[in-house]
Amino acid sequence: MSQAILSLKNATIYQEDKVVLSNVNLEVNRGEFLYIIGKTGSGKSSFMKTLYADLPLTEGTGHIVDFDLETLKENDIPFLRRKIGIVFQDFKLLPDRSIQDNMLFVLRATGWSDQNEMERKIEEVLDKVGMKNYAQKMPHQISGGEQQRVAIARALLNDPELILADEPTGNLDPQTSVEVLDVLKKINGNGKTIIMATHDYALLMKFPSKTLKCEDSKIFEVVQRTV
């Protein structure tokens, strides 16, 4: 098994017919924590969408969690997404069912069938994000920060090799953002690779890590200035 969990070579990322990022060369090793920064519209989300195959990679080569993005077939996409946990800015919890049932929905959709195994797994991931006692709550009964913790737990259900977090603190206040980042950092400390798109520079200062910037259709590493 190679060390690189993600490798892009001479990749060009398109949104419809428009070039968003060109000549992307990037390697992310297992266990890394990587920030993607840049202004709104600079290509962060298109970059993330390419990684979980919401946008096709039509130019250059790309490998992610042992899948080839260039030759990926439509019916491979669900299998790719089982190896990747995705955390969105707007949580994407189903509002008509409890936290427990949100989790069950994902497990059933990804091929789980044993009820006891499913319940054990749900308890395990909720415990990891400090939400074990909230399983019977409805999404509207918990705060935004708690909903994002649940969304992170949901991303862990299939024990993914890689977590993609697209502006996970974008809808949260600064204190809650720090708490959510703390959860992600702990998960990373347990060996999970995390790529996080953000424009929250305060978080970068508080939790420094390798950082890539999207600007002028390019993506490049930036060195954080330390005071």
Image: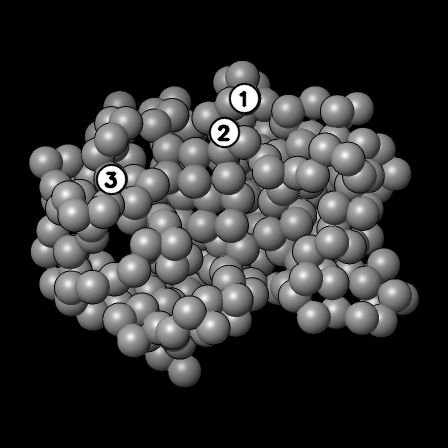
Sequence-first disc among 1 and 3:
3
- Foreground mark, 2 or 3, reads 3
Sequence-first disc among 2 and 3:
3
Return the x and y of residue 35 as percentages of the image width and height: 34, 42
Q: Amino acid at mark 2?
A: Thr
Mark 2 neighbour class, 10 Å CA radius: few under 14, some 14 to 19, many 20 or more: many
- Foreground mark, 1 or 3, reads 3
- Where residue 18 sits, quadrant-wise, is top left
* Depth check, front residue: 75 or 49: 75
Return the x and y of residue 171 as percentages of the image width and height: 51, 23
Q: Amino acid at mark 3?
A: Gly
Q: Is residue 186 left or right of residue 208?
A: right
Q: Which mark is residue 43?
A: 3
Q: Is residue 1 left or right of residue 38?
A: right
Q: Is residue 119 left or right of residue 215?
A: right
Report the residue at 63% width, 55% height from top.
156
Q: Is residue 144 left or right of residue 23?
A: right
Q: Are marks 2 and 1 in contact (CB under 8 Å)?
A: yes
Distance of mark 2 from mark 1, alpha carbons? Answer: 5 Å
Q: Which mark is residue 25?
A: none
Distance of mark 2 from mark 3, alpha carbons? Answer: 18 Å
Colour pattern of the rendering: one colour
Return the x and y of residue 10 as percentages of the image width and height: 12, 63
Q: Amino acid at mark 1?
A: Leu
Could you say whether the residue bearing mark 2 is in a helix, strand or loop?
loop
Residue beneath label 1, please?
172
Q: Are marks 1 and 3 in contact (CB under 8 Å)?
A: no
Residue beneath label 2, please?
169
Could you say whether the residue bearing mark 3 is in a helix, strand or loop?
loop
Could you say whether the residue bearing mark 1 is in a helix, strand or loop?
loop
Report the residue at 81% width, 46% height from top.
100
Report the residue at 63% width, 27% height from top.
145
